[in-house]
Amino acid sequence: MKFTNNTFVITGGGNGIGRQLVLNLLARGARVAAVDIYQDGLDETAQMAGGDSSRLSRHIVDITDRDAVSVLPEDVIKAHGVVDGLINNAGVIHPFTGIQEMDTGTIKRVMEINFFGTLHMTTSFLPYLRERPEACIVNISSMGGFLPVPGQGIYGASKSATKLFTEALYAELLKTNIQVSVVFPGGVRTEIVDQLGIDSQALKSLAGIGAFFNPMSPEKAAMRIIKGVEKGCFQIYVGIDSIFMNVLYRLNSKLAIKLITKQMGPLLDV
């Protein structure tokens, strides 16, 4: 997939990986429609873009609101003329909590943003992407989408749903002009980690995790994602931890689960 002079919609563009995806694509000559629920974050992204911000539009949208999302494609086309790619990056995490202790409100919020937000965005933009000679849909799942992480069961369920949804979409669009990619980031040092209320240094100190859990910067994660999309990759694994655990989980899922439980279990006393 080419980036120069093409228009991409990126959710979660006001911080973290989403912001870096916006800045990276703008630097490559793309036009970008950055979507976020917070105005301040998008404004800061625009400031960081500098002169490239002339090719950036900002859209304040709650992606869990299907009606609001349904009119977004026309807003993007009004700003840029066309839309060539969609990157569903927006997501939230929840505190390390056992499934039984999770409250219904938190469960619904995580599923609404991580899965249904991705679903709403995809189905709303798909008819417009079909009209382009070349287009792409990129959905950000997680290492937790293929490997269960103690204390992140609901987050993992939402990202697993995103994984399977994207794989089904890939199968359905095989004979079309639309390239579909699913991304599995490992540990990335973003605001989503800060939501846990646990410092990354504390995570590193648990069960010898320091040699394994080395959070990647959002800048490097965004670069890996963009390179994968550029190459037309279906599955994009971001970080040594994601690559390693994917291989281990495929070879011996029980061993992989025991390993991640040993490393992360102390956060739940399991």
Image (tube, rainbow, N blue to C red):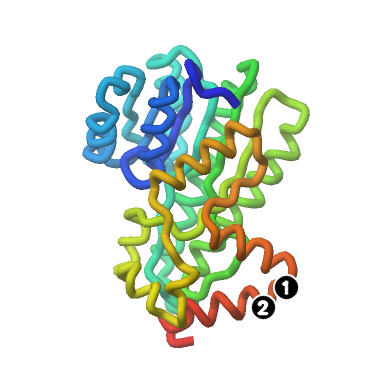
At a point 41% along the width and 32% down the height, the residue shown is: 24
Q: Give the camera-side residue of 137 and 127.
A: 137
Residue hosting label 1: 252
Q: Amino acid at mark 2?
A: Leu
Could you tell me which quadrant the N terminus lies in?
top right
Going by the picture, which residue comes out furthest to the top?
Answer: 81
Q: Secondary structure at mark 1?
A: loop
Where residue 77 sits in the image (x, y, percent)? 45, 17
Is residue 266 toward the left or the right of residue 253 in the image? Answer: left
Which residue of the protein is positioned furthest toward the front in this rendering?
A: 211
In the drawing, does residue 126 fall left or right of residue 216? right
Quarter assignment of residue 194: bottom left
Location of mark 2 (residue): 255
| Residue type (three-letter) at the residue carrying disc 1 | Asn
**Residue in the picture at 47% in, 30% down:** 70
In this view of the protein, which residue sits in the foreground, 22 or 37? 22
Q: Residue at left 30%, top 17%?
A: 54
